[in-house]
Image (cartoon, rainbow, N blue to C red):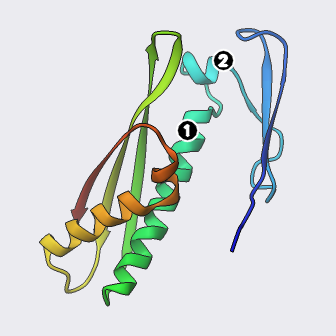
């Protein structure tokens, strides 16, 4: 099976004075604005790193749900945050790291098994596999 999802970005102007808009095939984002200020200066608006973090958090949490199910568990709730680090490196910028933080309530699971399954989800999530960055995980049961 092969699934293709599409997103697009449009840009006008220079780097610092330009303006961009991001759209997704689903319509969840429809010409949503982004720009230099929202990426590098803390101004309100989205940016590629934030969107990557949302994708990674969502992907990892779904992978964790599958891995839990395969092991005979169902989470009451899982909340995942993704902190994406963008660093200036020689020749420009790079995603240097992603820190995933999982807080979960899973009945009857032992802590050791929970951490083992979370590590498996981190390693096998398709977004994790796509990134050439250090990906860390901080998982904790509620």
Disc 2 vs disc 1: Cβ atoms closer than 8 Å?
no
Give the image location of residue 24, x and y in percent: 78, 50
**Residue at screen point 61% across, 34% down:** 48
| Residue 124, image quadrant | bottom left
Left or right of residue 84: residue 5:
right
Left or right of residue 29: residue 89:
left
Above or below, 48 against 105 in this view is above
Mark 2 or 1, nearer chain start:
2
Q: In this view of the protein, which residue sits in the foreground, 30 or 43?
A: 30
**Residue at screen point 64% across, 34% down:** 46
Q: Crowding near pointer 1: few (<14 within 10 Å), some, many (20+)?
A: some
For label 2, the SS is helix
Left or right of residue 108: residue 44:
right
Above or below, 50 against 82 in this view is above
Residue 74 in view of the camera: no
| Residue for badge 2 | 36
- As drawn, the label of residue 132 is none
For label 1, the SS is helix
| Residue for badge 1 | 50
| Residue 50, image quadrant | top right
**Residue at screen point 48% across, 69% down:** 62
């Amino acid at each position: 099976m092969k699934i293709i999802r599409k997103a697009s970005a449009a840009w006008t102007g220079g780097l610092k004075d330009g303006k961009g808009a991001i759209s997704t095939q689903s319509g969840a984002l429809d010409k949503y604005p982004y720009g230099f200020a929202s990426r590098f200066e803390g101004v309100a608006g989205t940016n590629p790193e934030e969107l990557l973090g949302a994708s990674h958090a969502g992907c990892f949490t779904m992978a964790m749900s599958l891995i839990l199910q395969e092991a005979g568990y169902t989470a009451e709730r899982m909340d995942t945050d993704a902190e994406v680090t963008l660093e200036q490196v020689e020749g420009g910028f790079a995603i240097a790291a992603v820190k995933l933080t999982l807080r979960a309530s899973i009945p009857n699971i032992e802590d050791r098994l929970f951490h083992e399954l979370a590590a498996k989800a981190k390693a096998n999530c398709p977004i994790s596999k796509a990134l050439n960055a250090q990906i860390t995980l901080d998982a904790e049961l509620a």
